[in-house]
Image: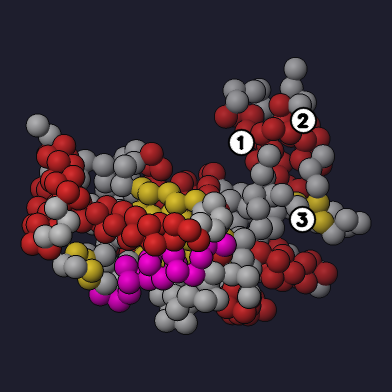
């Protein structure tokens, strides 16, 4: 029997007899031993040069993201004894690459990338007040057991700004400095939050730069207090679950990463990438035509893509015989 299968059996047993804290501690200890000596086959040797090339080749128009993600992930993965989990919060409007960058990070850490059974994606589907206690318990147990069996687990939370604050607070203890929950250390785990919160603020700052005649590529984290504005926007949004959670004011998020709105040239690059994905012969003129047919804002100047690269593939197939 493979060690991973044996671990699964042990975890199932712990479910049946969860009243015994001793057995839970045993499972956690056994899980750590299995990870340490047997279950590292899905982890890639981390190579910052590989991550840098991947970001450069497959991410379009996000120079701030490339810079922050490369430095943050490299520092974390190179630290043999981190003092807390890595917590990245991605902010921007739809289609600017938040999910895409999460996948890039995953494929540079795990052999199976986003499909690794150590990568866990949570997508928020709206309020479930009648089952909130059950969902909180399931979320807490899922995160705990994943890290118990594999300390270098990754958790991706989509629509984070719409999540109920009670669910957000379930995650909070796992993110803390020297986080240790029921005997399990979470310092090697990675948490990535995806959110539209702050997207309008980011777009406004980008438009301000354009109106001032400043090149978009000169916009950085400290430009016009961009990071501070994102933080304030999230913290003051009465409709955001972040507002009612103590995660932000306790400074558990390491990096607020702004995704800039995309311009025509970036959407054109996305179309070219989709051509390659669909095995369509590269055609710059066709890519330009498809990109120009996407909606842009402001309506008159048409500077930034309203939907980023979202639905580019669907638009492309309308132009292909």
Q: Quadrant of residue 226?
A: bottom right
Q: Main secondary structure of the magenta part?
A: helix
Task: Report, in whole angstroms, how far the alpha carbon at label 2 lies from the one at label 1.
Answer: 13 Å
Q: Secondary structure at mark 3?
A: strand
Q: Is residue 298 left or right of residue 255?
A: right
Residue 91 as seen in the image, left or right of residue 289: left
Looking at the image, which residue sits at the far top? 321
Q: Are marks 2 and 1 in contact (CB under 8 Å)?
A: no
Q: Of tags 2 and 3, which is closer to the observer?
A: 3
Q: Which mark is residue 78?
A: none
Residue found 43% across the figure and 49% down from its top: 121
Q: Which element carries disc 2, helix, strand or loop?
A: helix
The stretch drawn in magenta includes residue 177: yes
Q: Is residue 137 above or below residue 120?
A: below
**Magenta run includes residue 135:** no
Which residue is denoted by mark 2 in the rendering?
A: 286
Q: Residues within 10 Å of mark 3 (few under 14, many from 20)?
A: many
Q: Quick one: SS at disc 1? A: helix
What segment carries the magenta color?
Answer: 162-178
Residue 299 spot, x, y in % from top left: 88, 56
Q: Mark 3 or mark 2, which is nearer the start of the sequence?
A: 2
Q: Which residue is mark 1?
A: 273
Q: Which residue is mark 3?
A: 304
Whether residue 91 is visible: no
The local crowd at label 1, few if under 14, some if 14 to 19, many if 20 or more residues have their Cα within 10 Å, is: some
- Separation (CA) of disc 2 from disc 3: 20 Å
Asked whether, in this view, residue 320 is left or right of residue 1, the answer is right
Quarter holding the N terminus? top left
Asked if marks 2 and 3 touch (Cβ < 8 Å), the reply is no
Locate the C terminus and report the quarter of the image it occupies: top right
State which tag comes first along the sequence, 1 or 3. Answer: 1
């Amino acid at each position: 029997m493979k060690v991973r299968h044996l671990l699964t059996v042990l975890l199932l047993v712990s479910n049946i007899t969860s009243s015994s804290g001793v057995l839970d501690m045993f499972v956690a200890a056994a899980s750590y031993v299995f990870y340490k000596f047997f279950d590292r086959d899905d982890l890639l040797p981390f190579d910052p040069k590989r991550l840098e090339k991947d970001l450069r080749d497959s991410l379009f128009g996000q120079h701030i993201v490339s810079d922050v993600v490369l430095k943050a992930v490299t520092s974390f993965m190179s630290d043999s004894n981190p003092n807390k989990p890595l917590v990245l919060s991605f902010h921007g409007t739809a289609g600017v690459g938040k999910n895409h960058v999460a996948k890039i990070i995953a494929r540079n850490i795990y052999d199976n990338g986003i499909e690794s059974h150590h990568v866990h994606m949570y997508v928020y589907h709206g309020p479930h007040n009648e089952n909130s206690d059950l969902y909180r318990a399931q979320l807490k147990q899922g995160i705990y057991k994943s890290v118990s069996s594999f300390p270098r687990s990754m958790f991706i939370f989509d629509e984070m700004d719409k999540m109920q604050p009670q669910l957000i607070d379930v995650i909070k203890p796992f993110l803390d400095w020297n986080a240790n929950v029921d005997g399990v250390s979470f310092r090697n785990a990675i948490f990535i939050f995806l959110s539209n919160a702050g997207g309008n603020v980011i777009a406004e700052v980008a438009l301000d730069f354009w109106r001032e005649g400043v090149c978009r590529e000169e916009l950085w984290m400290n430009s016009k207090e961009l990071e501070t504005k994102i933080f304030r926007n999230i913290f003051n949004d009465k409709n955001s679950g972040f507002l009612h959670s103590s995660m932000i004011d306790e400074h558990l998020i390491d990096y607020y990463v702004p995704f800039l709105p995309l311009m025509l040239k970036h959407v054109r690059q996305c179309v070219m990438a989709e051509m390659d994905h669909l095995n369509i012969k590269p055609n710059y003129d066709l890519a330009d035509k498809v990109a120009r047919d996407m909606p842009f804002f402001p309506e008159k100047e048409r500077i930034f893509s309203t939907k980023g690269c979202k639905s580019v593939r669907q638009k492309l197939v309308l132009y292909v015989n």
